[in-house]
């Protein structure tokens, strides 16, 4: 076949701007608006349509370290952001009772130990564990040592230059974050239109969205539409009929209840996820309150029992009645279809077990900016966007499934999870690890080898062996190597101030 000629596109100018319409506000809408308003120039017009009468889900109060890149790219001052959102710091996620009641482990950010030569640290740890002198993985994680001590630090280490800086993320009030970003976006020319979308008109020839109509009768046209309308998928699903891939057979929880409670005395710099008979409960400490929620499977417990159990397991008094949420875990069959890109809950949903909801918004925005179309949209760009997003969703899905599948609990829900047929990609990763402790991260998988290691070991998945190179180090030298890491991290953590004290000194919010 010969080369296919592609007609050149007319340049985008302030006189002929590309109009991008964002349908929906909330965290997804305003993160998108803030980024587009910041990075796009005069050749683009950004309009966001939202109705004050339509509430937002707002379950994403915990994040992973990539959120710092998003805020930094927008030039947002971290302390100002923390004050505006009643934020606290996050060093990882503690998992309680997942393997069995009474057991706990942490998926902490940052490295575990230190790699030596050609092979990663886990192989030396596995050798030492087999010989009976290894400490738990937590002994070699600076983030976990600091987190469990209730401390916090930013910047260079205090005691040794060989210690890496402490990686961290945030807990924050998602509603306050959306409001913060709205002010940011509007200051950069983003236009907010109040109103409820009541009709969507497609172009008769191309099938693209031509315009949306508001309850007031106003018509809003655009070249590119961003669907941030939540589970409903007003544009991507109701208008375009894109389709949805249901993952309930792998991730069976289909309900959530969210409730705020009073500020926790135990002001931990980490999220807590506690397993229960038919799901799990989250705990997210903020400056002004604690975020709590129960994720559960309606086939194994009733809504009333889930609500009663949620309230019974709060650390502090409830500040409202539990708010219900129904969902189907999965993803759209296309994330970019015609001239509509779905971002946030409109693109799919995976429960907040590993705090990926806001990250998926962030990565979608980054991907869109890299493949951003002008007036004309190309099939190749859409296909590449969808390919990358599919890969990201699938690999996060596998990581979440691992938590459910690798359990030793006795309840019927957990027994059913243990007996599920796994996706081939997850089964292959498990086989590789159980053989000789190998973990391979493909392409730009979100979760690193160290993240997989902590959850695999934490959930009781044990390799049969380790890399043979790890057997070549003298046992005395290996003992000293492991002891030195723990001593360095314990000494470093001991110099850090308390999490609450750090917030009070740097970024305390004004009391309501």
Image: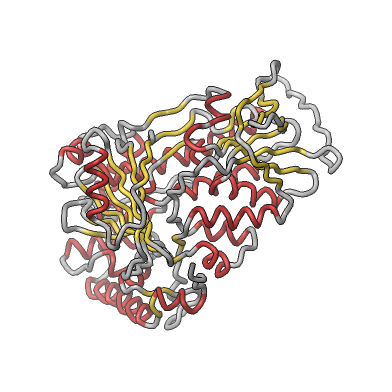
Asked whether residue 290 is in view, the answer is: yes
Residue 458, by quadrant, is bottom left
Asked whether residue 462 is in view, the answer is: no
Please name the residue shown 26% across and 50% down the image: 310
Please name the residue shown 35% across and 63% down the image: 262
From the top left corner, tell me how far across and down residue 166 is, in percent: 44, 70
From the top left corner, tell me how far across and down residue 263 is, in percent: 36, 66
In this view, the residue in front, 342 or 54, is 54
Drawn side of residue 356 relative to residue 38, left or right: left
Drawn side of residue 392 relative to residue 283, left or right: right
Q: How is the image coloured?
A: secondary structure
Q: Is residue 330 above or below residue 365?
A: above
From the top left corner, tell me how far across and down residue 506 is, in percent: 51, 76
Q: Quadrant of the N terminus?
A: top right
Q: Is residue 150 above or below residue 232?
A: below
Residue 252, by quadrant, is top left
Of all residues shown, which one is farthest toward the left?
Answer: 410
From the top left corner, tell me how far across and down residue 8 is, in percent: 81, 31
In this view, the residue in front, 385 or 499, is 499
Please name the residue shown 23% across and 48% down the image: 308
In this view, the residue in front, 500 or 8, is 500
Of all residues shown, which one is farthest toward the top?
Answer: 204
Please name the residue shown 31% across and 44% down the image: 295
Q: Is residue 268 above or below residue 405?
A: below
Drawn side of residue 398 relative to residue 39, left or right: left
Residue 91, by quadrant, is bottom left
């Amino acid at each position: 076949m010969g080369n296919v000629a592609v007609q050149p596109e007319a340049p985008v100018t302030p006189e002929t701007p590309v109009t991008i319409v964002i349908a929906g506000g909330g965290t997804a809408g305003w993160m998108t608006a803030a980024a587009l308003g910041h990075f796009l120039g005069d050749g683009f017009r950004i309009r966001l349509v939202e109705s004050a009468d339509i509430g937002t889900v707002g379950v994403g109060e915990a994040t992973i370290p990539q959120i710092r890149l998003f805020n930094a790219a927008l030039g947002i001052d971290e302390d100002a952001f923390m004050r505006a959102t009643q934020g606290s710091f996050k060093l990882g996620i503690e998992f309680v009772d997942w393997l069995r009641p009474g057991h706990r482990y942490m998926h902490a950010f940052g490295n575990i130990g230190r790699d030596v030569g050609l092979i990663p640290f886990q192989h030396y740890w596995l050798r030492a564990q087999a010989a009976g002198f290894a400490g738990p993985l937590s002994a070699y994680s600076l983030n976990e040592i600091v987190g469990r001590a209730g401390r916090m630090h930013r910047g260079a280490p205090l005691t040794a230059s060989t210690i890496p800086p402490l990686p961290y993320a945030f807990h924050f009030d998602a509603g306050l974050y959306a409001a913060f970003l709205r002010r940011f976006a509007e200051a950069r020319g983003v236009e907010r239109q109040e109103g409820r979308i009541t009709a969507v008109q497609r172009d008769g020839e191309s099938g693209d969205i031509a315009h949306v109509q508001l309850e007031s009768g106003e018509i809003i046209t655009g070249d590119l539409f961003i669907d941030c309308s939540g589970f409903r998928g007003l544009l991507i699903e109701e208008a375009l009929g894109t389709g949805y891939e249901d993952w309930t057979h792998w991730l069976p929880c289909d309900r959530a209840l969210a409730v705020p409670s009073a500020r926790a005395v135990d002001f931990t710099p980490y999220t807590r996820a506690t397993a229960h008979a038919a799901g799990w409960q989250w705990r997210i400490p903020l400056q002004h309150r604690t975020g709590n929620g129960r994720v559960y499977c309606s086939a194994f417990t009733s809504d009333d029992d889930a609500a009663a159990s949620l309230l019974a397991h709060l650390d502090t008094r409830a500040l409202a009645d539990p708010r219900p949420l129904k969902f189907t875990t999965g993803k759209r069959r296309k994330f970019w279809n015609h001239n509509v890109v779905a971002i946030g809950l409109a693109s799919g949903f995976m429960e907040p077990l590993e705090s990926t909801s806001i990250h998926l918004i962030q990565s979608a925005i980054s991907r869109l900016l890299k493949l951003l179309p002008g007036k004309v949209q190309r099939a190749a760009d859409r296909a590449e966007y969808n390919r990358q997003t599919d890969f990201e969703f699938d690999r996060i899905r596998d990581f979440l499934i691992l938590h459910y599948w690798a359990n030793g609990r006795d309840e019927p829900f957990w027994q059913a999870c243990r007996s599920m047929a796994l996706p081939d990609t997850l089964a292959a990763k498990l086989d590789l690890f159980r053989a000789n402790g190998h973990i391979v991260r493909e392409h730009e998988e979100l979760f690193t080898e160290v993240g997989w290691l902590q959850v695999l070991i934490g959930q009781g998945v044990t390799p049969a062996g380790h890399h043979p190179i790890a057997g070549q180090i003298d046992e005395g030298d290996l003992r000293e190597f492991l002891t030195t890491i723990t001593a360095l991290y314990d000494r470093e953590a001991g110099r850090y101030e308390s999490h609450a004290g750090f917030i009070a000194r740097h970024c305390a919010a004004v009391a309501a």
